[in-house]
């Protein structure tokens, strides 16, 4: 006798989200720099896989002995790492500043960026990057019917599932996971 396995939508979706890495393509993501020290300010924007651009860039005091741009996967810059090997040695001379990601870390490694004094462990300010409205965040979809399934509830379309010759009812579950590059996975389970 075949016994259908119970599979809930929660058990199907939660592991997918829990194991999803941070998206590597964050082009267009932005964040506003907080000003914690040195008069730092501006808006950080991801230009491409190796460049961040700060517009309305302000830094009144760049005289700290070891200022570098850092990134972190948390919101604590002190838990982070250097993302650019170019030392910041002076106050802002332009309202646009480009950060080249050349220290061995990529966009998938961090979601917060900031100016960090390595000698004194001082945070000059940081920004948490976020996608533009309607951006690259995987979400479950409703109303989508994968190929091979029939809308209407059960696999036979009558909303009652499939009854086999032994009187057991099997329930079909269909899903679609949408991500950065469109549909990442679509499938169908039936008991």
Image (spheres, rainbow, N blue to C red):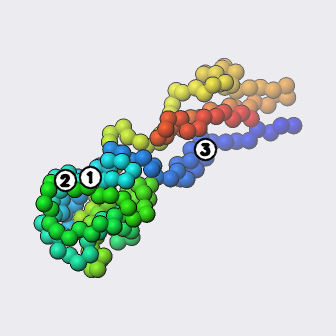
**Mark closest to the chain's N terminus, 2 or 1:** 1
Query: Helix, strand, or loop for circle 3?
Result: helix
Which quarter of the rendering shows the N terminus? top right
Give the side of residue 93 with respect to residue 163, left or right. left
Local packing at callout 1 (Cα closer than 10 Å; few below 14, some 14-19, many 20+) is some
Nearest to the observer: residue 49 or residue 117: 49
Query: Helix, strand, or loop for circle 2?
Result: strand
For marks 1 and 3, give the one nearer the viewer.
1
What residue does disc 3 label?
Answer: 12
Tell me the distance, in whole angstroms, between the alpha carbons under discs 2 and 1.
7 Å
The quarter of the picture where residue 81 lies is bottom left
Q: Tags 2 and 1 in contact by the CB under 8 Å rule? A: yes
Query: Helix, strand, or loop for circle 1?
Result: strand
What residue does disc 1 label?
Answer: 53
Give x and y (percent) for residue 149: 65, 24
Name which residue lies at 50% across and 53% down: 21
Name which residue lies at 41% across and 42% down: 136
Name which residue lies at 61% across and 46% down: 11
Give x and y (percent) for residue 113: 32, 60
């Amino acid at each position: 006798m075949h016994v259908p396995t119970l599979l809930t939508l929660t058990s199907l979706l939660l592991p997918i989200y829990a194991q999803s890495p941070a998206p590597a393509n964050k082009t267009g993501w932005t964040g506003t720099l907080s000003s914690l020290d040195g008069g730092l300010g501006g808006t950080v924007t991801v230009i491409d896989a190796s460049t961040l651009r700060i517009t309305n860039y302000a830094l009144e005091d760049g005289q700290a002995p070891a200022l570098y741009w850092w990134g972190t996967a948390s919101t604590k810059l002190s838990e982070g790492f250097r993302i650019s090997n170019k030392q910041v040695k002076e106050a802002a001379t332009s309202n646009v500043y480009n950060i080249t990601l050349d220290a061995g870390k990529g966009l998938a490694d961090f979601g917060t960026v900031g100016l960090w004094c390595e000698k004194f462990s001082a945070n000059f300010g940081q920004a948490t990057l976020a996608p533009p409205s309607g951006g690259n965040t995987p979400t479950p979809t409703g109303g989508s019917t994968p190929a091979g399934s029939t809308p209407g509830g059960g696999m036979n379309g009558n909303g009652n599932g499939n009854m086999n010759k032994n009187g057991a009812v099997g329930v079909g579950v269909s899903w679609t996971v949408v991500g950065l590059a469109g549909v990442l996975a679509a499938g169908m389970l039936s008991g």
